[in-house]
């Protein structure tokens, strides 16, 4: 289909056009939210509007030394964050959401300019950001423990066991460029809910909306009497993030981005906890009994939104032979429904990808598939060819490839662009096998009129979420639990990943002794267990829970008589054994 031409972006050696964009940025210029204040930083980087190459803003960029300062401040804030009550955490999250909602149009405009995503997709991003704050605020009041049976063995007779959850410690949140505000929120909101200080690192191409959000977050923290160091942000190159990831004080590292970088981060963070939100390659099965028109509509909605730069974007379409020809023809016919143009226009569906390098990478993968025997169903070869200049290289029409070899890069790997690939199979069993033949496992979809086929897909597709019929840019976060190369956590429940199980086994009569000798109730005996020096050393591990067994060795009164030091904690009066 014809592609709307764009003005050429200036070459790197040329001066960029002055920013013509009426975007309001409230964050202090030349500074980042590091420590309890906005710390001046020496560097800066251009944030460019992908549609025309114009300068949006010069964003402050930090250095490795700034990351070290942020880590020091986050570690110092650990105790204060952990001590926040559930009511405080919930109130903070709710107020942050309300303030972003009050400025949602401003955030939408910033996102359009820095990501180049169509306005309709940026509106969705802000809406989901608000839902994340609302849902996490609600879930903060559901961080509970559980009682556990201890008398499965004779040694457990008469013992009461339970576990609670406590904050894991400093969290590092590294977000991708495609949904910068939402992805940062997926890390920041659960950290606040769990009582953890967090350092956010946005992608350097798209830091503006996240910096503006941090301004609001820190204002709300201050109004609730909480140190601003509970939420910090650094911005810059890989070296800025590497120091954060490698530092042992960072007990949890949450990363959204490519599989290659995610695996590197997991190695750098080991043995500490790494929550990896990596790539995907969504498989989309259309069975012979499917509603072809509805399935085509789903591909138009799910394959090209956000300029194809979304982790759950439809990429591999597996067609059962009986409907393959009709589906392919209707998909090509209906591509004209997608409006290609200026992302600021509410009617636009597709705009240039994030930068020239991405555009050239996507075109190279398409051309390699064509050379290997794939068929270019749309657009024409002339429309697919890159024009002159960086902006033209980033501007891609919607691409549909047929008969794609299953060893081609566009089939095997995540394209992260407006490209969908078709293949034909003879049965649903074969379709499921084809979708499962992937190193990715976030999501898949099936279109069918048969419950038997739907449940076969649900049972046998090796992905975190299977969508029956509807597909698009919004999937409930509770189903995003990828099996292969993607999610290791659920977005709205990440606060459980940011806390650790803390188990206590208490003999009823030792609790009575502690109550009698030190004036603590049985409940307070357990609540104060972390005060003992011996126990404190064992609670620092973010990923390993511990069991505390109190044994009736000597009554409290005997310890009190023998020890002239005042008894300040009941655990100091009991023999403790870790097992």
Image (cartoon, helix red, strand yellow):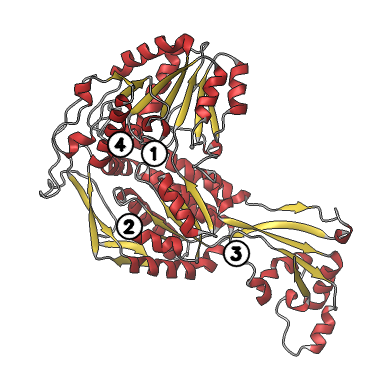
Q: Position of residue 7 (x, y in %)?
A: 13, 34
Bin the neighbour count of mark 2 within 10 Å (Cα to Cα): few under 14, some 14-19, many 20 and up: many
* Residue that sits furthest to the front in the current view: 372
Q: Which mark is residue 117?
A: 4
Q: Nearer the viewer, residue 311 or 227?
A: 311
Quarter location, residue 309: top left
Instruction: Looking at the picture, tell me which residue is in the foreground, 87 or 79.
Output: 79
Residue in front for this viewpoint, 382 or 76? 382
Residue drawn at point x = 56 percent, y = 46 percent: 493
Between marks 3 and 4, how big is the CA–CA gap?
Answer: 41 Å
Q: Earlier in the sequence, mark 1 or mark 3?
A: 1
Label 3 CA crowd tier, 10 Å (few <14, some 14–19, many 20+): some
Q: Could you tell me how far apart the alpha carbons at marks 1 and 2 are, in whole angstroms?
A: 21 Å
CA separation in Å, label 3 and label 2: 28 Å
Disc on the earlier residue, 1 or 4: 4
Q: Mark 1 = which residue?
A: 125
Image quadrant containing the C terminus: bottom right
Quick one: label 1 or label 2, which is nearer the N terminus? 1
Tell which of 367 and 47 is nearer to you: 367
């Amino acid at each position: 289909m014809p592609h709307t031409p764009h003005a050429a972006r200036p070459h790197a050696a040329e001066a960029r056009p002055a920013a013509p964009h009426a975007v309001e940025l409230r964050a202090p210029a030349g500074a980042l939210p590091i420590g309890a204040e906005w710390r001046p930083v020496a560097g800066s980087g251009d944030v460019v509007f992908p549609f025309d190459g114009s300068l949006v803003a010069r964003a402050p960029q930090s250095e490795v030394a700034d990351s070290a300062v942020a880590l020091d401040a986050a570690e110092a804030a650990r105790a204060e964050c952990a001590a926040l009550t559930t009511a405080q955490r919930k109130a903070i999250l709710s107020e942050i959401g309300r303030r972003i909602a009050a400025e949602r149009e401003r955030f939408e405009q910033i996102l359009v300019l820095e990501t180049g995503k169509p306005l309709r997709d940026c509106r969705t991003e802000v809406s989901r950001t608000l839902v994340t704050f609302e849902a996490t605020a609600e879930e903060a009041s559901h961080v509970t423990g559980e009682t556990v049976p201890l008398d499965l063995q004779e040694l457990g007779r008469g013992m009461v066991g339970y576990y609670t959850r406590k904050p894991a410690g400093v969290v590092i949140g590294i977000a991708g460029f495609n949904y910068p505000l939402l992805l940062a929120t997926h890390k920041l909101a659960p950290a606040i809910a769990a009582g953890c200080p967090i350092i956010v690192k946005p992608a350097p191409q798209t830091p503006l909306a996240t910096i503006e959000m941090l301004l609001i977050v820190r204002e709300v923290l201050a109004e609730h009497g909480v140190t601003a160091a509970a939420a910090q942000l650094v911005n810059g190159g890989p070296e800025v993030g590497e120091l954060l990831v490698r530092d042992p004080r960072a007990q949890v590292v949450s990363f959204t981005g490519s599989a290659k970088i995610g695996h590197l981060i997991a190695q750098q963070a080991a043995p500490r906890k790494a929550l990896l939100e990596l790539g995907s390659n969504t498989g989309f099965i259309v069975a012979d009994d499917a509603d072809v028109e509805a399935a085509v509509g789903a591909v138009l909605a799910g394959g090209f939104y956000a300029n194809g730069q979304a982790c759950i974007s439809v990429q591999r379409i597996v067609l059962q032979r009986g409907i393959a020809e009709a589906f392919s023809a209707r998909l090509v016919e209906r591509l004209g429904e997608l409006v290609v143009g200026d992302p600021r226009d509410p009617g636009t569906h597709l705009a240039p990808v994030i930068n020239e390098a991405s555009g050239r990478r996507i075109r190279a993968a398409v051309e390699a598939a064509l050379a290997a025997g794939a068929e270019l169903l749309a657009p024409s070869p002339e429309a697919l060819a890159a024009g002159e200049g960086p902006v033209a290289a980033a501007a891609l029409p919607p691409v549909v490839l047929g008969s794609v070899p299953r060893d081609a890069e566009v089939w095997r790997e995540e394209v992260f662009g407006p490209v969908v690939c078709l293949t034909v199979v003879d049965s649903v069993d074969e379709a499921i096998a084809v979708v499962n033949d992937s190193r990715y496992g976030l999501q898949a979809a099936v279109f069918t009129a048969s419950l038997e086929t739907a449940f076969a897909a649900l049972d046998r597709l090796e992905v975190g979420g299977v969508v029956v019929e509807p597909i698009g840019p919004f999937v409930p976060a509770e189903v995003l639990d990828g099996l292969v190369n993607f999610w290791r956590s659920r977005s709205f429940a990440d606060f459980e990943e940011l806390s650790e199980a803390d188990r206590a086994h208490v003999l009823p009569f030792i609790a009575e002794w502690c109550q009698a000798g030190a004036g603590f109730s049985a409940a307070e005996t357990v609540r104060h267990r972390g005060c003992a020096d011996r126990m404190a050393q064992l609670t620092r591990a973010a990923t390993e829970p511990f069991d505390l067994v109190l044994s009736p060795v000597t009554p409290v009164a005997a310890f009190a008589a023998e020890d002239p030091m005042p008894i300040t904690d009941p655990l100091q009066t009991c023999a403790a054994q870790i097992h």
